[in-house]
Amino acid sequence: MTLQRAIGVVMKLAERQAIGNYAITGAVAALNYIQPTLTEDLDILISIDGFEKRVSGLLLLTPIDGALAQMGYTERTGLGYMIEEWPVQFLPVASPLDEEALEQAEEVNIAKSGATPIMARCLSAEHLVANAIKVGRFKDLARVQAFLEQDAIDFERLKGVLKRHNLLSAWSEFCLKASIKDPLATER
């Protein structure tokens, strides 16, 4: 499975300290909680410690470039680095929500059923939902709907995340647009 091998390369980057703390995010992370959806890439949230920052605020991913080149991965596309036939995007922490999500990422087994476990870091369902609410793109809101329909959220935990990051009103707007009763309304 090329996705599993791509994640293995990301784990090697962490072992080699080309990246610090990392976690799988986006649609691939959602696979751990809900039924699969179509995705074009693998998103990896990374800490920015150790990366050179320019005065302009631009973050240089030189350690990732160098480490991937040493492992034989030099191709880039508009979607990211090509690793084991998967475009991989490294997304630097850009907000307090990202920081918390990365800090509280969970170890999940990415190995095929019955195979030797391979543990990788992955964002929690609640942080994935909070991020989707924050971003607000149609595909992200559709993913939130899937989390709700598949009962894949700890509502108490989600409420805490949304409160800490001032996203309760965005959550209420989502519920209104989706024409659903707000499952957090009685708990506020």
Image: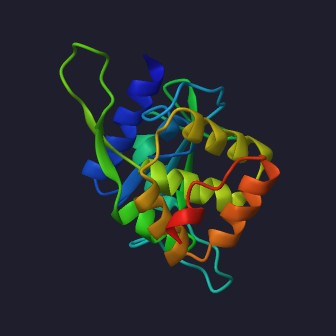
Tell me if residue 142 can be seen. Answer: yes
Q: Which residue is drawn at 64% across and 53% down?
A: 132
From the viewer's perspective, is residue 187 above or below residue 84?
Answer: below
Residue 71 shows in this picture: no
Report the side of 70 relative to 138 (left or right).
left
The extreme left residue here reads 116
Asked whether 52 or 141 is in front, the reply is 141
Whole-percent x and y of residue 34? 50, 31
- Height in image: 139 above or below 183? above
In the rendered image, residue 86, in percent from the top left (x then y), is placed at 56, 29
| Quarter residue 18 falls in | bottom left
How are the colours assigned in the image? rainbow
Q: Is residue 15 above or below residue 134?
A: above
Q: Position of residue 41 (x, y in %)?
A: 61, 35
> Which residue occupies the extreme top position in the image?
114
Closer-to-camera residue (187/126):
187
- In front: 71, or 170? 170
Give me the residue at 49% from left, 31% from top. 31
Residue at position x 51%, y 38% from top?
A: 30
Could you tell me how many numbered marks the image carries? 0
Residue for point 24% across, 31% down: 118
In the rendered image, which quarter contains the N terminus? top left
- Between 31 and 121, the one lying in front of the other is 31
Give residue 105's position: percent from left, percent from top.
35, 55
Rendered position, 70 above or below 136: above
Q: Which residue lies furthest to the bottom in this view?
A: 55
